Image: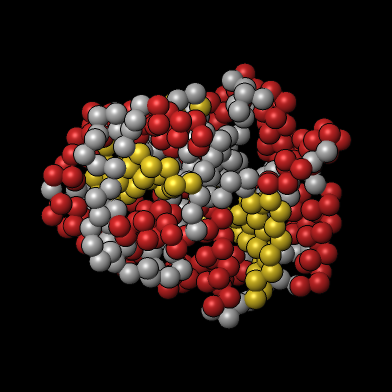
Amino acid sequence: MRILIIHNRYKFESGEEAVVLAESELLRRNGHQVISFELSNYLLDKLNIFQKISLPFRCMWSVSSYEEVRQVIKKEKPDLAHIHNTFFLISPSVYYACRKEGVPVVQTLHNYRFICPLATLYRDGLVCRECQDKGLIMSLRHKCGEKSMMWTAAMCSTLKFHHIKGTFKSLIDTYIALSNFSRERFIEAGYDPEKIKIKPNFINFDPGVASKRGNFALYVGRCSPEKGVDALMEAWKQVDHLPLKIIGSGDQFNEYRDYALRYNLNIEFLGQKANSEVINHIKDSLFVIMPSKCNENFPRTIVEAFACEVPVLASKRGALTEIVEDNKTGLLFEPEDIPDLLKKVRLLCENRDLAIAMGQNARKEFEAKYTAEKNYKILMDIYEGTLSKI
């Protein structure tokens, strides 16, 4: 099978990038030909003033992406296109390029961008669904998008334009939701449930289990408020017996690091790391912590922790309660409830046998659900089902 992978990379490396890479490698390993069309939001910082002025229009419809994808299709003749992300440089014009050339489209719903300009269903410290319930005008009222009215207007206009045209609902043949939670959110927003299939995230290799249990907690992810990193800062003001290591980057990275230094917190900021280094840190940790305030979709880090036989301490938010089974593969705590978070941290610190047992259960969960072999079968079923409808 010949698959065209379309992906607009983010400014900062994310789990989504790792998933795109892992799926591409998985397909190639199983004898399929993968053609990639990618751009990176890193280029946004290099635009001149005229390009920046025209960026909102490119976000809505990129003529160059439309033409380039059509040319790629004509040359490579893919059986289908698998689109991961089109914001902000590629733009949704590529859906029309695929339709023009008669190529079916599979879309992975890595986040909630189609129904939320911020893609997180989270705003100003609260879970939010106002754009879904009251219309995208709410994003303008609240100035979503890093409080930039111009950028908020551009994002809102792009989504509104393509909602009116029916781009996301009529030009996509199959959606891949990463969890049942995500699937239900899109069904609530009017997306056809028959077209939404569930395929969880995975890792395309077996890292093996941890040989020893370390003595630190580990957070891997973006350094931003919706991910709950500020809650970790507050919690670790009361934790001096267990170091916390943070791997990741983001706009608030320096702010959080300076805060930890100012209050002499037992936290080490490691910055962005290669996946092999992340795996090694996971293996050395006592547990991985996922303190998200927003409705998480499916953090790939959880699968990595499970594969390494390491339990996960997660907030009861979004799909996290679906992935982490409380008191079996990890522990769940109430979002933003610092006393509850501290209680669960102490429980794992004081009962290492419990942490080991949960890690063993997590490994079994990985073997049952999240291996490359199982994920490949699900992906092929989705592709073949999509092609059978054409």
Picture residue at 76% right of the left edge, 73% below the top: 76
The count of marks equals: 0
281 displayed left or right of 9: left
**In the picture, residue 80 is in which quadrant?**
bottom right
Q: In this view, does 285 lie above or below 234?
A: below
Q: Which residue lies furthest to the bottom in this view?
A: 31
Relative image position of residue 268 (x, y in whole percent): 38, 42
Q: Is residue 373 above or below residue 62?
A: below
Q: Is residue 99 above or below residue 52?
A: below
Q: Residue furthest top?
A: 141
Relative image position of residue 171 (x, y in whole percent): 69, 52
User: Residue 34, can we see it?
Assistant: yes
Nearer the observer, 344 or 283: 283
Q: Is residue 117 above or below residue 196?
A: above
Nearer the observer, 65 or 53: 53
**In the picture, residue 283 is in which quadrant?**
bottom left
Relative image position of residue 64 (x, y in whole percent): 83, 52
Identify the image quadrant of the C terminus. bottom right
Picture residue at 77% right of the left edge, 35% below the top: 56
Picture residue at 39% right of the left edge, 32% below the top: 260
User: Residue 100, can we see it?
Assistant: no
Relative image position of residue 281 (x, y in whole percent): 36, 56
Identify the image quadrant of the N terminus. bottom right
293 displayed left or right of 360: right
